[in-house]
């Protein structure tokens, strides 16, 4: 017997609607902040404009054209010819997780450089995918030398080496010259976190032999958080294609997502249309400006900050040679309440800067000069406000 479907209850017999959570919220309004912390940074006005553009469907020929352009621009920004170069739907951590979910198989030895917070996050993620994680350590604010990396490779013989190019928790820039060759010598894949370097400091994915690379939109690309680029070399794809087990994360499975971004255009999940508009626009801004020019702009803005701080008798945590222009860790002067300064900068001057994480908690402020915010007037504004707050 087939059960007869019951008719939906009539309005009269439905329960009464509760208004308990029916908040009369005001029309959205937020303060005008200058976002000079570790991220997000202020989006470029043109990116916000692109975000508000009318929608098309995710398989619309106009959108597919946009996808192709975005991929091509990403290849420029990363200096790579990798076919699989796509934006992941999510923030930088989603792209980070996608690189590991696709390439790590249970039992794989993954060597991770820990010289800041994001190496720890990589460890946490890699372990969740079953990796046998080996770690090498450096004090926060320092970087690994090629000799140190070689010694660790010889000791551990990993299937993958993961390093953070721009450590946002410390302000240090890890050199990559020679690391790709080292990895090939040991038949090892090289993974790089470039979230705070992309579009801000010199970065050559192919030249440096990086196999898996990810970034985020919200740092030096001046895109709001919510979309994050990723790129895989042929070696990384070979590892993915040779997997014995399915990628243990459906949403981030590149063998599925890749069919949508590749020639098949098969539906996997609906691409965040407007976030992709924003990503295209921020990449277009990089191409317009030119990479060399953009890197030079970030460097000179960073130096302006460092000089201004020195004039105030304030020091930076990282040696100049390895200091990131996109993120500066500033030593909190003796006797100053770092948290109170951050609070006052926000309350009185609408300026957000960050506090220290982990080993550097309570010891430094983190100042981001990323993308659209990397301009002399930003530095002058911050220094003037900081002088007031510190009573100088
Ligand atoms: C910000 C950041 C991430 C994570 O990006 P989210 O957008 O916060 O998910 C990863 N790595 C580094 C180095 C970062 O600075």
Image (tube, helix red, strand yellow):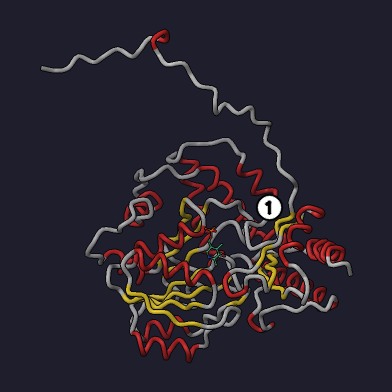
Task: Tell me, yes or no, if residue 276 can be seen here.
Answer: yes
Q: Quadrant of residue 6?
A: top left
With respect to residue 312, does 195 lie above or below?
Answer: above
Query: Which residue ends up furthest to the right in the rendered image?
Result: 392
Residue under the point 35% across and 12% down: 9
Answer with left or right where residue 292 lies relative to residue 212. right
Taking the image as shown, residue 365 lies to the left or right of residue 22, namely right
Please name the residue that numbered disc 1 is placed on.
Answer: 44
The percent position of residue 182, horizontal first and vertical second, equals 42, 85
Quadrant showing the C terminus: bottom right
Q: Position of residue 346 (x, y in %)?
A: 75, 55
Asked whether residue 263 appears in the rendered view, the answer is no
Which quadrant of the render holds ligand 1? bottom right
Residue 178 locus on image (x, y percent): 48, 85
In which image quadrant can residue 219 be found? bottom right
Badge 1 element = loop
Along the viewing direction, whichever of 198 and 122 lies nearer the viewer:
122
Q: Nearer the viewer, residue 314 or 303?
A: 314
| Dot 1 alpha-carbon crowd within 10 angstroms: few under 14, some 14 to 19, many 20 or more | many
| Image position of 234 with respect to 17: above or below | below
Count of marks, rendered view? 1
């Amino acid at each position: 017997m087939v059960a007869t479907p019951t008719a939906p209850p009539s309005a009269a017999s439905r329960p009464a609607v509760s208004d308990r959570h029916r908040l009369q919220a005001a029309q959205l309004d937020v303060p005008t902040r200058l976002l000079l912390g570790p991220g997000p940074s202020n989006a470029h006005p043109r990116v916000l404009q692109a975000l508000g553009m009318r929608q098309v469907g995710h398989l619309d020929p106009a959108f597919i054209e946009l996808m192709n352009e975005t991929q091509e621009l990403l290849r420029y920004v990363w200096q790579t010819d990798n076919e699989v170069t796509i934006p992941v739907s999510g923030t930088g951590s989603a792209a980070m997780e996608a690189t590991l979910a696709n390439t790590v198989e249970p039992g794989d030895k993954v060597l991770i450089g820990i010289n800041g917070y994001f190496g720890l996050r990589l460890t946490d993620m890699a372990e969740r995918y079953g990796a046998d994680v080996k770690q090498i350590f450096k004090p926060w604010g320092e970087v690994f030398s090629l000799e140190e990396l070689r010694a660790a490779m010889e000791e551990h013989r990993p299937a993958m080496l993961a390093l953070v190019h721009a450590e946002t928790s410390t302000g240090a820039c890890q050199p990559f010259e020679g690391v790709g060759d080292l990895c090939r010598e040991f038949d090892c894949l090289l993974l790089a976190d470039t979230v705070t370097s992309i579009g801000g400091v010199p970065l050559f994915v192919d030249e440096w032999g990086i196999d898996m690379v990810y970034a985020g939109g919200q740092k030096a690309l001046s895109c709001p958080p919510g979309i994050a680029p990723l790129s895989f070399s042929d070696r990384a794809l070979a590892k993915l294609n040779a997997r014995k087990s399915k990628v243990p994360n459906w949403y981030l499975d590149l063998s599925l997502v890749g069919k949508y971004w590749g020639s098949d255009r098969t539906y996997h999940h609906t691409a965040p249309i407007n976030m992709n508009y924003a990503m295209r626009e921020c990449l277009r801004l990089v191409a317009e400006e030119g990479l060399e020019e953009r890197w030079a702009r970030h460097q000179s803005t960073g130096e302006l900050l460092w000089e201004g701080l020195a004039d105030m008798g304030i020091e930076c945590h990282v040696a100049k040679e390895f200091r990131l222009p996109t993120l500066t860790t500033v030593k909190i002067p003796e006797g100053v309440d770092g948290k109170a300064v951050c609070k006052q900068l926000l309350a009185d001057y609408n300026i957000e800067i960050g506090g220290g994480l982990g080993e550097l908690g309570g010891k430094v402020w983190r100042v981001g000069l990323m993308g659209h915010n990397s301009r002399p007037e930003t530095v002058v504004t911050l220094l003037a406000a900081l002088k007031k707050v510190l009573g100088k």
